[in-house]
Every structure is written in structure tokens, then in C-alpha cells.
Amino acid sequence: MFNQKHLELFNNQQTPFYYYNLELLQNTILAIQKAAPKSYHIHYALKANAHPTLLKPILAAGFGADCVSGNEVKRAVECGFKSENIVFAGVGKSDREINYALEQNIFCFNVESMHELKIINELAGNKGTKAGIALRINPNVDAYTHKYITTGLEENKFGINPYEFDAVLELLKELPNLNFLGLHFHIGSQIQDLTAFKNLCVRVNEINKWFAQKGFLSKNINVGGGLGINYREPDTQAIVDFEAYFKVFQSFLELMPEQQLHFELGRCIIAQCGSLISRVLYIKEGINTNFAILDAGMTELIRPALYQAYHKIENISQLNSVANKKYDVVGPICESSDCFGKAVELPLTQRGDLIAIRSAGAYGEVMSNRYNLRDAVESLFTGSLS
């Protein structure tokens, strides 16, 4: 929640910029540590936000790193994450990325196809080493989320399908440079219905037992991440209910003796601590539609344009005013999709007002781009300004 101190600080900053509340990030980390059993292994998903300043408290908490590119592996290594706590997923790992990860002796590759198994085996053999691998399984579980961020159905490009299991096991017997470590699952992102995770547990139990019966006991079960946040009310639920989330896995997942459970959490850790702060450039008043044109655009936060994502929008220059006028809040980019929200109720808004687009800590800065040759945007970090 923003107050007069924020307004005074922000008025001295060049807009647009990303604002991060490190105190909220720290409190979120503490909530995870309190809710998760000590035996659980938490890996932070760097794809949500890989800013080194934000990675420091995450690293200090003892979390590992979940990476989906070679450069994310490199960022994790450079920021101090131990190699034995780094996992590398992704449906299209290049030879260069795999070789770098092998050189770093990372804990595990989450492998998504039989072809990838062969390539990692070959590259590991060239280096005279063995690669730890987990099989990313497509469990055909519906995440009840947007189709662009659903990853666990047969129609998705991710993971190994059950009809391939027998062939995969036969192939693994022929690949001497791979060390089978376990099974990996990830069904999607921004999941708020915990029933999806219960359904995942049921499928994991079935698949885990099948592999064990075939002589492939998984030392590690990785259930991915995907826990969603409340974009509409970021202040009333700044920290998600991690106790309820972990309780699902405690209640429904049937681990075998000595199996370790891993999670890959991203958005739910970092999203609410960040906002995109922008300034109103122009107001266009029409017969049916009023436009508030900002100096931030889809280049700074692409989620609304990419999959019609909702972000709460606030005029923080009018903190004590009543929201009584509707605006389409848009950016300056030469694309009609450059719109943060339609018919957004705001106080009477004018040129120079500061606008906060909330819950932008995840998939905001990390997805920014230089389209229209836009300037790079800076970040501002604070602790508490209450």
C-alpha cells in the first residue's frame, strides 16, 4: 500500500521505473520457511525475476535456483547459488547451454524428451563426466489457468508423455553418462485453485509407483511451482497462503522412504513486492472512452498485452481522492495492444500524476524489451516506508 512517503520518494525519480519493497520480499520468504516442512527443498524460479538485488535474500534463505536457460544458470552461479542447488529445465536447451551447466556440475537437468536425453549423454561423455537428470513428466493434469501458461496437458510442448515411458526406460539403460535422479512435474502458472495440485499429487503417486516397479526408484520428486497470487487485491493478500499450499502435498502426496520433495516457486515469492511506477503524459477525453496515456508501456510490462492479464492500477498522486472516472490506461508504444487496463476507475487524473501498476515483481522487468528503441528502465529498492 502506497502512502505520502512513497509519493515524495517517487516524485524525485525518472519514470518509468520498477519499485521493489524488500521488506515484503523478506516477509514472504519467512512465511515460506515457516509453512514448509524442513525436509522440503525450495528452488526459486529465476524466470520470474532475476535481478541480483532480489536474489540476495532468496539465496540467504537457503533456497536453490530453478533455471530455464544457460544465462539463468550463469546468473545463479554468479550470484552465489551452490551448484548442487541448481536445476536446469527447458524444452529447448542448446548444446552451449548444456555444456556450461555440465562445467558448473549442477545438481540436475530436468529433461523433456528422449532426444534431449541422448544429447546430454553425448555431451557429458565428451567431457568425461555424468549428468544428473530428472525426467520431466507431462501428467495430463489441467491447471485451470490461462491456456498460454498451462504446461501439463498432452497438447502442450513440455515434458515426456506416459505413452513414452517404456521407451524412455529402455533408452536410459543405454546411456552410461546419465545419472537418473528422479521425476519432475510442472502443470502451469498462476494456479489459484488448489484442487489442481491435489490432482497433480494423485498422478505423481501413480507415476512414481510405476517407475519404482520398473526398477527406477526416484530419489527426488520435483512438483514444480505455479502457485498464483491475488492480482486484484494485492494489499489484502500480499503474502499467499503457503500453509494451505504445502498442506495439499503433505496430505495427498505419497513419498517413498528417503525420497526428497522439491518445489520451484517464482511468482508467489516475488510478484507482490514489485510495482511499475509511471507518469501520465496525456489525457484524451472522448465521447465513450477516456484515455490516460502513460510513459510506461508494454515494453516494461508485457503481461496485459500478451495474455490479457489483470494488474491493479492506482493513481498514487491522488491518494485521498475517490475513484469516480473511467480511463483506458495505455502506453506510448505503437501497438493497439499496448494497454494496461480498460475502463479503469481512477480519481480525476491529470498530466504528471504518478500511476502504480501493482504486482509487477514477477514477469515485469525480466520480460522488458527495447521495442521502439525504448530506453532501459531503472529499478528502485526500499525496505519499509510505512
Image: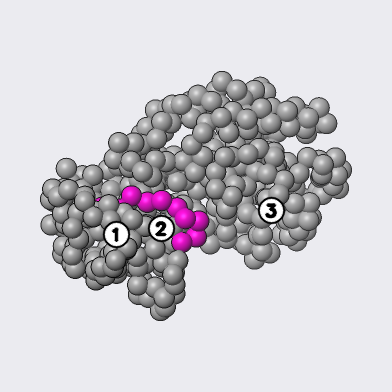
Q: Amino acid at mark 3?
A: Lys
Query: Nearest the camera: 55 or 350?
Result: 350
- The image shows residue 71, relative to residue 273, as above or below, that is below
Is 312 one of the magenta-colored residues?
yes
Q: Nearer the viewer, mark 1 or mark 3?
A: 1
- Crowdedness near tag 3: few (<14), some (14–19) or many (≥20) residues, C-alpha within 10 Å: few
Q: Residue at x 43, y 26 (%)?
A: 243
Secondary structure state at the residue bearing disc 2 = loop
Q: In the rendered structure, which segment of residues is drawn in magenta?
A: 305-314
Using residue 214 as the reference point, say whether residue 240 is left or right of it: left
Q: CA distance from mark 1 to mark 3?
A: 38 Å
Labelled pair 1, 3 in contact (Cβ < 8 Å): no
Q: Is residue 325 above or below residue 244?
A: below
Question: Mark 2: which amino acid?
Answer: Gly
Residue sitting at the far front: 287
For the point 41% across and 58% down, which residue is it? 364
In the rendered image, the vertical position of residue 360 relative to residue 353, given as above or below: above
| Residue 13 in sight here | yes
Q: Which residue is mark 1?
A: 327
**In the image shown, does 105 or 35 lie closer to the viewer?**
35
Q: Which residue is mark 3?
A: 157
Residue 364, numbered label: 2
Q: Quadrant of the C terminus?
A: top left
